[in-house]
Image (cartoon, grey):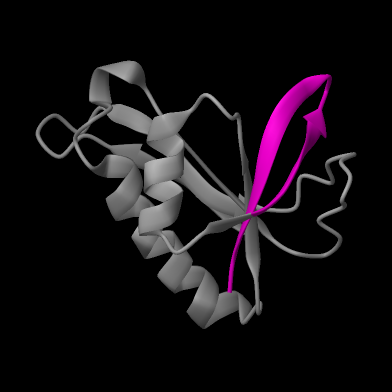
Amino acid sequence: FGYWAVEDRETGRYAGDVGVADFKRPIEPSFGETPEMGWTIAPAFQGRGYASEAGAAVTNWADETLGAPRLVCMIAPENATSFRIAEKLGFSEYARTEFKGSPTVLLERG
């Protein structure tokens, strides 16, 4: 799979990460062999579209390179920003569960 650093357009400074991996998370329902997408943007760079832009590039890469019929991601219920990004990237909710004792929402694309 792949994970890439996101850089600020103006300064070249590290702004975050986005990618697809198999984290082998102990979660129910299991992700199985389905690739998991994730993104994180440093607070100083949030709200500039970096997660959406990099996320779109990575989903395109995953579609072309991995040929996986589905991608998944997980988001804490209170993270409204990540839900907006996930929706832009074509993800929709399919389950609610707990991960490490905290509520989490599972989303899928594909």
Identity of the residue drawn at 83% across and 23% down = 100
Q: Quarter-wise, where is residue 84 in the image?
A: top left
In the foreground, 106 or 68 = 106
89 is higher (above) or lower (below) than 50:
below
30 vs 88, left or right, is right
Residue 90 lies, with reference to residue 106, above or below; the image says below
Residue positioned most to the left:
10
41 and 47: which is toward the camera: 47
Is residue 70 found inside the magenta-colored segment of the image? no
Describe residue 1's horizontal placement relative to residue 8 as left or right.
Answer: right
Q: Quadrant of residue 16?
A: top left
Q: Position of residue 75 (x, y in %)?
A: 59, 36
Location of the C terminus by quadrant is bottom right
Residue 103 magenta-drawn?
Answer: yes
Left or right of 72? Residue 23 is: right
Q: Which residues are magenta?
A: 94-110
Residue, x 53% and y 51% (percent of image)? Answer: 19
Q: Residue visible at 81% across and 56% down?
A: 31
Above-or-below relation of 17 to 60: above
